[in-house]
Image (cartoon, rainbow, N blue to C red):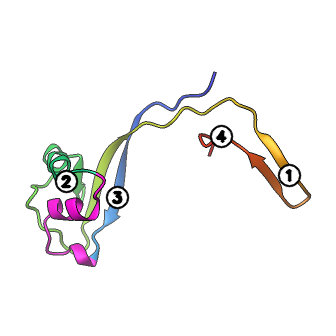
Amino acid sequence: MAPIVRPYWYAHKTNAKGRWLGRTVLDVYSAEFQDQTTEYYQSAIETGRITVNGHRVATSYVVRNADVLAHATHRHEPPVTADPLRILHDADDLLVIDKPASIP
């Protein structure tokens, strides 16, 4: 049976970039992180999944120097397979293996 990593919450944290200063937190996320919609980011800010300096803020919060922005996401890792590794090359100073992507 393959080991399974239970889903978990992870906070992606970043320090405010110079180009973000003076912009709203909603504008920063909508423009800089385009993998989600503006509506998603608005909801994430309003529900506290996106925070600034560890605190909930309004979507109109203006990003300042030294702010730390965090976005908590629910992560689902793929199961780690129990398939055996295949050795492709074995030398004194180099080992090459073929492994499933689910193994780090």
Q: Main secondary structure of the magenta part?
A: helix
Residues at marks 3 and 2, CA–CA distance in whole angstroms? 13 Å
Of callouts 1 and 4, the N-terminal one: 1
CB atoms at circles 1 and 4 under 8 Å apart?
A: no
Q: Is residue 59 left or right of residue 49?
A: left
Residues at marks 1 and 2, CA–CA distance in whole angstroms? 52 Å
Q: Which residue is mark 2?
A: 55
Secondary structure at badge 3 equals strand
Queried whether the magenta region covers residue 24, the answer comes back as yes
**Disc 4 residue type?**
Pro
Q: Is residue 82 left or right of residue 65?
A: right
Q: Is residue 55 left or right of residue 7?
A: left
Of callouts 4 and 3, the N-terminal one: 3
Q: Which residue is mark 4?
A: 100
Q: Which mark is residue 89?
A: 1
Of callouts 4 and 2, the N-terminal one: 2
